[in-house]
Image (cartoon, coloured by chain):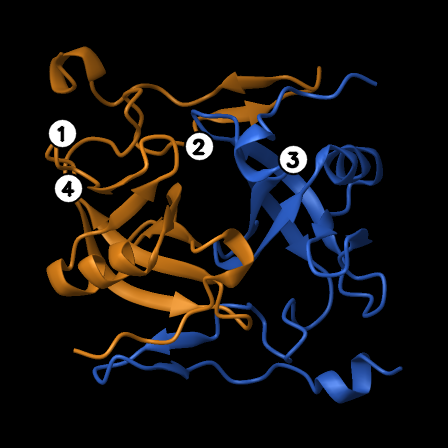
Chain colours: A orange, B blue
Amino acid sequence: MSIPKLDYSKLDGLVTAVIQDWKTQRVLMVGFMNEEAFQKTLETGKCCFYSRTRNKLWIKGESSGHFLIVKEMRTDCDFDTLLISAEAIGPGVCHEGYASCFAKQLNENQEFVYVDKQTYNPDEVYKN
Amino acid sequence: MSIPKLDYSKLDGLVTAVIQDWKTQRVLMVGFMNEEAFQKTLETGKCCFYSRTRNKLWIKGESSGHFLIVKEMRTDCDFDTLLISAEAIGPGVCHEGYASCFAKQLNENQEFVYVDKQTYNPDEVYKN
């Protein structure tokens, strides 16, 4: 299978991947993919990222079961960012127990505070 | 004015900023901000980015008039990504003449092809 052209040069071998809920249009998370992670995403139909802190590939959902099933993929004018429309399996994408990782909003006092409610208890999902 | 806490350490002094249309929820573009760009965004209410290729700040719209007016800001669990809900002034955000920079979709042949139609003629807007 050929791999679509993307430009990994601007971020040391990575492209940014924005994951958007295919029905609600809500932005669920942002991660990074190297070429291997992108290829794995294409092959499996599940979003696979490259962890910069752990220095390895990870399929979103591999420990929680909260997979992100690819519905549509787009790229931007520079070919260095992916916008993936996905179906989020399970109650939430964020490992802190929220539907979206973007659960914190800037308030009038210039502080980011949680405005969303948890959709599940992360302690029951992410054991160990 | 105090500056809200963000983590710039993972991307060499930058955070990723996803810009989403405040009404349609469409993702319009993705850029990067250093702390100065973020501060300028807060102060002016217009999205300001750091250009990695030109190595300088730029206010989106400074040459085209297509400003992005901040309506809401969110950050994620790691404080290293911004999700900005914005009003896009003008016919399009992309310098190639499209409403969104994400005008190309992956097709069945694993190629990214334009699926959107241009909303303006970039040659008439980006004059030198």
Distance of label 3 from label 2 (alpha carbons): 20 Å
Distance of label 1 from label 2 (alpha carbons): 19 Å
Mark 1 on the same chain as mark 2:
yes
Mark 4 or mark 2, which is nearer the start of the sequence? 4
| Chain hosting mark 2 | A
Mark 2 or mark 1, which is nearer the start of the sequence? 1
Disc 2 and disc 4 in contact, CB within 8 angstroms: no
Quadrant that contains the N terminus of chain A: bottom left
Distance of label 3 from label 1 (alpha carbons): 31 Å
Q: Residue B70, image x and y in percent?
A: 69, 43
| Chain hosting mark 1 | A
Residue assigned mark 4? A89
| Chain hosting mark 3 | B
Distance of label 2 from label 4 (alpha carbons): 17 Å
Distance of label 3 from label 4 (alpha carbons): 33 Å
Q: Residues within 10 Å of mark 2 (few under 14, many from 20)?
A: many
Element type where label 3 sits in the image: loop
Q: Residue B116, image x and y in percent?
A: 47, 80
Mark 3 on the same chain as mark 1:
no
Amino acid type for the residue under numbered disc 3: Gly
Residue shown at 14% from the left, 64% from the top: A43
Mark 2 on the same chain as mark 4:
yes
Q: Residues within 10 Å of mark 3 (few under 14, many from 20)?
A: few
Residue shown at 17% from the left, 53% from the top: A46
Amino acid type for the residue under numbered disc 4: Ile
Disc 1 and disc 2 in contact, CB within 8 angstroms: no
The mark closer to the camera, 1 or 2, is: 1
The circle on residue B13 is: 3
The mark closer to the camera, 4 or 1, is: 1
